[in-house]
Amino acid sequence: MLREQTKEIRIGDRILGGHNPVLIQSMTNTKTEDVKATIQQIHRLENAGCELVRCAVPTKEAAVALKSIKKEIHIPLIADIHFDYRLAIAAMENGADKIRINPGNIGDNQRVKAVVDEAKARQIPIRVGVNSGSLEKHLVEKYHGVTAEGIVESALDKVKLIEDMGYDNLVVSIKSSDVLMCIKAHEIIAEKIKYPLHVGITESGTVYSGNIKSSVGLGAILYQGIGNTIRVSLSGDPVEEIKTAKLVLKTLGLRTGGIEVVSCPTCGRTQIDLIGLANQVEDMVKDIPLDIKVAVMGCVVNGPGEAKEADIGIAGGKGEGLLIKKGEIIKKVPEGQLLSALREELLNWK
């Protein structure tokens, strides 16, 4: 479903919204005050494909650390602020390319205005973030609980507050750990504002459960043409967030590039370690710059037919395997040489 394009917002050297691609974001889980560890983690995120990175700023020391961190990284740096408006100002003074605040947690309107005035002076975007867990009491009472409608109303109130202060360089984020509530809230707000939306399922869980919840939620929202930047929130290594985000975007046709690996689920006919082989192939291809599909099949009987939609594939049997292109067998090789034969074909791809 195509929707009207949002306003464009510049974050560092990236443009968010409009006709621009959906950008992948993550957040460091190091102590921001530990400059070396934070830079190292951001470099890992950059190498994985992260395009925007957010750091928590809970202290003045963390705000000051942003200046040193920014010098050593290559993607825009976002400061995540809770409660203390002075930290938002300090983060901007130390080079943050964007700040994330919940105006409801910052304090009275004068404190919010102090943040907005600093952002306006520096032309730094503000991400207005609202989570279902921090929904205001009067909205919980109005909607008889935490609801999608209440989350949207809270976000719209905060957007209007900042607009009334003369600033519209905004990105909006409405998050919930309830996937269906999150989907509904995005459907509602997309009809009401034209600011870019940052999309994510908050507190989604471990790498296993979080990947599933995030993929379902992000997929349903993005498929409707909603969303301009995403984060897969996981309790784990943030590099895993990037892997999932890239695959979600590619699956929806919103990204190209990189080898996609498909593999059969195995059955009683399988006579090789297909699971191990598929994992080896996935690891082998991650740095090969091709935009193709590779199939890993466990049956030499049905493998060629099942792999016909892939550009290239391998199918293993007892002691030997087949190398397949577009469903046609091109070579039979010993089982132990399947991986190397596939790699050779990929490195000499024409």
Image: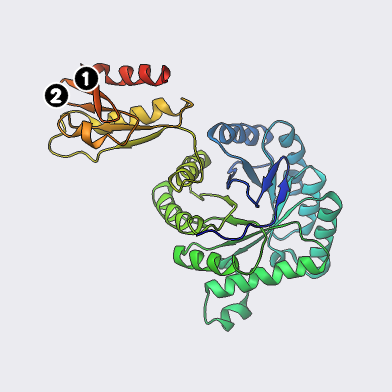
Foreground pick, 176 / 312: 312
Q: Which residue position is annotated with label 1?
A: 335
**Residue 51 at x, y = what percent?**
61, 40
Q: Residues within 10 Å of mark 1 (few under 14, many from 20)?
A: some
Residue depicted at x 63% and y 47%: 20
**Residue 219 at x, y = what percent?**
45, 54
Mark 2–mark 1 Cα distance, whole angstroms, equals 8 Å
Q: Are circles 2 and 1 on residues that touch, CB within 8 Å? A: yes
Q: Secondary structure at mark 1?
A: helix
Q: Residues within 10 Å of mark 2 (few under 14, many from 20)?
A: few
Foreground pick, 15 / 275: 15
Which numbered disc covers residue 4?
A: none
Residue depicted at x 27% and y 34%: 307
The three-letter amino acid code for the residue at tag 2 is Lys
Residue depicted at x 74% and y 40%: 66
**Residue 350 at x, y = what percent?**
42, 20
**Residue 26 at x, y = what percent?**
58, 45
Q: Secondary structure at mark 2?
A: loop
Q: Earlier in the sequence, mark 2 or mark 1?
A: 2
